[in-house]
């Protein structure tokens, strides 16, 4: 990667991290949890920037959200890892056999949808695992209480990721021509031969 490409990668990753942060601020309370737009931004980062840069943008934005909203460093690091893996999964699936270049065809749109579904399911599994470990081993909650907390948190995370799986491919399809026009996709994610 050239020095100029490295600068572009840093700038676009930072921009997407800021978008993840800001869109996580927009939420609707739901029981023990909240429905927010951060997961859609995280998956969009994976689709636009690819699995590694998108994962970094997603993780960094979510990390700083947690850190600045009183969740503590350990919680922020766990969030970084889970959001990184969510965006990475979305990017990996969407990038599978990517050769379309500037044209966004039906196969690439389907891969974007599948990527968001896989990314969402990845995050749900990681979030439920985190909740289980936190409740069972950190807080010492009995097993039945742990399941109750997990079931209380599941609807909000399912809604977050269901929303993201629907909205993100639409946003990606709308943004892709503009991103191609300014060279973002080719600069950061060269086509496979």
Image (tube, grey):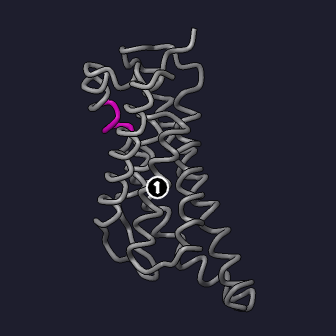
| Residue marked by disc 1 | 60
132 relative position to 74: left or right? right
Q: Whole-percent x and y of residue 32?
A: 46, 82
* Secondary structure of residue under mark 1: helix
**101 versus 70 height, above or below:** above
Q: Quadrant of the C terminus?
A: top right
Residue at image location 53% in from the left, 51% down from the top: 120
- Which residue: 45% across, 14% down? 100
Q: In this view, does 47 lie to the left or right of 143?
A: left
Q: Left or right of 82: which side holds 137?
A: right
Name the residue located 37 percent from the left edge and 31 percent from the top edge: 8
Q: Quadrant of the rendered structure where residue 176 is?
A: top left
- Looking at the picture, tell me which residue is in the foreground, 46 or 4: 4
Q: Identify the residue at the far front of this view.
A: 3
Horizontal and vertical percent position of residue 159: 43, 62
Q: Nearer the viewer, residue 77 or 172?
A: 77
Q: Is residue 93 above or below residue 43?
A: above
Per the image, is 189 magenta? no
Q: Write down the quadrant of residue 45 in the picture.
A: top left
Residue positioned 59% across, 50% down in the render: 85
Q: How crowded is mark 1: few (under 14 residues within 10 Å), some or many (20 or more)?
A: many
Most frequent secondary structure within the magenta stretch: helix
* x then y, percent, for residue 119: 55, 47
How many numbered marks appear? 1
* Residue 10 % position (x, y): 41, 39
Q: Give the range drawn in magenta.
A: 169-173
């Amino acid at each position: 990667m050239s020095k100029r490409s490295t600068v572009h990668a840093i700038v676009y990753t930072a921009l997407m991290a800021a978008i993840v942060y800001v869109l996580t601020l927009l939420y609707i309370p739901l029981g023990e949890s909240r429905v927010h737009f951060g997961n859609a931004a995280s998956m969009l980062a994976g689709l636009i920037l690819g699995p590694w840069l998108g994962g970094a943008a997603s993780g960094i934005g979510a990390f700083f959200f947690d850190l600045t909203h009183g969740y503590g460093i350990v919680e922020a690091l766990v969030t970084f890892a889970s959001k990184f893996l969510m965006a990475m999964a979305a990017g990996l699936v969407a990038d599978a056999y990517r050769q379309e270049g500037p044209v966004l065809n039906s196969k690439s749109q389907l891969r974007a949808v599948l990527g968001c579904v896989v990314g969402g399911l990845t995050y749900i599994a990681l979030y439920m695992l985190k909740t289980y470990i936190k409740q069972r081993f950190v807080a010492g909650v009995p097993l039945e209480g742990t399941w109750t907390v997990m079931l209380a948190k599941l609807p909000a995370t399912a809604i977050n990721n269901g929303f993201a799986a629907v909205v993100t491919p639409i946003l990606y399809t709308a943004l892709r021509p503009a991103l191609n026009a300014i060279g973002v996709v080719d600069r950061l994610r060269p086509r496979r031969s």
